[in-house]
Amino acid sequence: MATVTFRLGKNAKLYIAPLGAGEPTTEVKRITDASLNLSRADIDASTRESPDVKTYLAGPADWELSFNILATDGAGPYADIAAAFHNGTGINAKCVNAATGIGVVASWIITEFSEEQPLDDVIKTSVKLKPTIYDDDFLPTAVTA
């Protein structure tokens, strides 16, 4: 009988840098529940030639990076992300699976920065990012090992 080894969700690595600063190198360590949602639009390419079946072409990709970050005082990644959101600017970020090296890197706008303050847990902020183009030399790119 084959043994199956499942990976725990602890392999996500997030790195950030100021918008326009190039490749992100500052690791954001206090994140939980990281999620990289990748989808692609479908374009109907059906014709009279299609054998009674709709056919499609791949359209543009849609990326969304979301995570929870533990709120911290003072300078650091939390403050950098908060400032980018409140200033309406953005950040450069790279999210990879440390086990496989697969992920994405891009300049991102911050579309959500929602803080939760439960009485019986630490303060967390839910963050959502969507790619943008800030610098022509730093376009959204898939990262492979």
Image: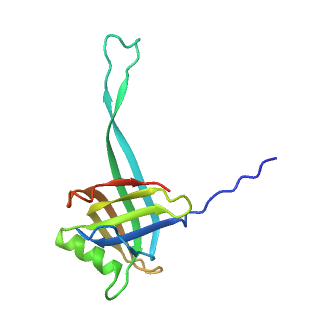
- Pick the residue in front: 139 or 38: 139
The colour scheme used here is rainbow
In this rendering, is residue 75 above or below 24? below
**Percent x, y of residue 92:** 30, 66
**Percent x, y of residue 27:** 42, 75
Q: Is residue 86 left or right of residue 116?
A: left
Q: Residue at x 44, y 59 (%)?
A: 35
Q: Residue at x 29, y 67 (%)?
A: 22
**Percent x, y of residue 33:** 47, 65
**Percent x, y of residue 73:** 34, 87
Residue 108 occupies quadrant: bottom left
Numbered-mark total: 0
Residue at the extreme right: 1
- Pick the residue in front: 93 or 40: 93
Q: Is residue 93 left or right of residue 33?
A: left
Q: Residue at x 27, y 62 (%)?
A: 107
In this rendering, is residue 8 above or below 123? above
Q: Residue at x 76, y 52 (%)?
A: 3
Residue 91 occupies quadrant: bottom left
Q: Is residue 14 left or right of residue 100?
A: left
Residue at the extreme front: 137
- Pick the residue in front: 35 or 3: 3
